Amino acid sequence: MAQIREEDPQVAVVIVAAVPDRAELQRALDLGAVDFVRKPFDAAEVDFVLDRVYRAVTEDADLRTALDYLEERTTRM
């Protein structure tokens, strides 16, 4: 996770684990993973998780854009 965050701090990481070690899973979530899927998984579960992650990332990007816009406007005043 640390390497991924160094490369791109904005990337959304979903952990896929066959036998998730609770401590390792918690560590990955603490380091910035946004969700996880346990193997074996079905398409509906993956679709649900990826949809949730997509919505969260999109909302976050929209919020950052709005905040940047407001900051720019207030700086010019």
Image (cartoon, rainbow, N blue to C red):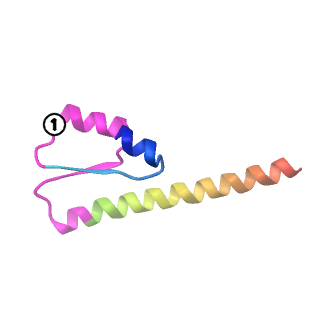
In the picture as drawn, the residue positioned furthest to the right comes out as: 77
Residue at 32% from the left image edge and 39% from the top image edge: 29
Whole-percent x, y for residue 19 in the image? 10, 44
* Residue 28 is covered by the magenta coloring: yes
> Which quadrant is home to the N terminus?
top left
- 13 horizontally vs 40: left or right: right
Whole-percent x, y for residue 3 in the image? 37, 41
Tell me the magenta residue range: 18-46
Q: Neighbour class for label 1 at 10 Å: few (<14), some, many (≥20)?
A: few
Count of numbered badges drawn on the protein = 1
Residue type at mark 1: give it.
Asp
Residue at 86% from the left image edge and 51% from the top image edge: 76
**In the picture shown, does residue 23 fall above or below 1?**
above
Residue at 66% from the left image edge and 57% from the top image edge: 66
* Residue 26 is covered by the magenta coloring: yes
**What residue is shown with label 1?**
21
- 22 horizontally vs 31: left or right: left
**In the picture shown, does residue 20 fall above or below 12?**
above
Locate residue 33: give its quadrant.
Answer: top left
Residue at 29% from the left image edge and 33% from the top image edge: 27
Whole-percent x, y for residue 2 in the image? 37, 38
- 69 horizontally vs 54: left or right: right
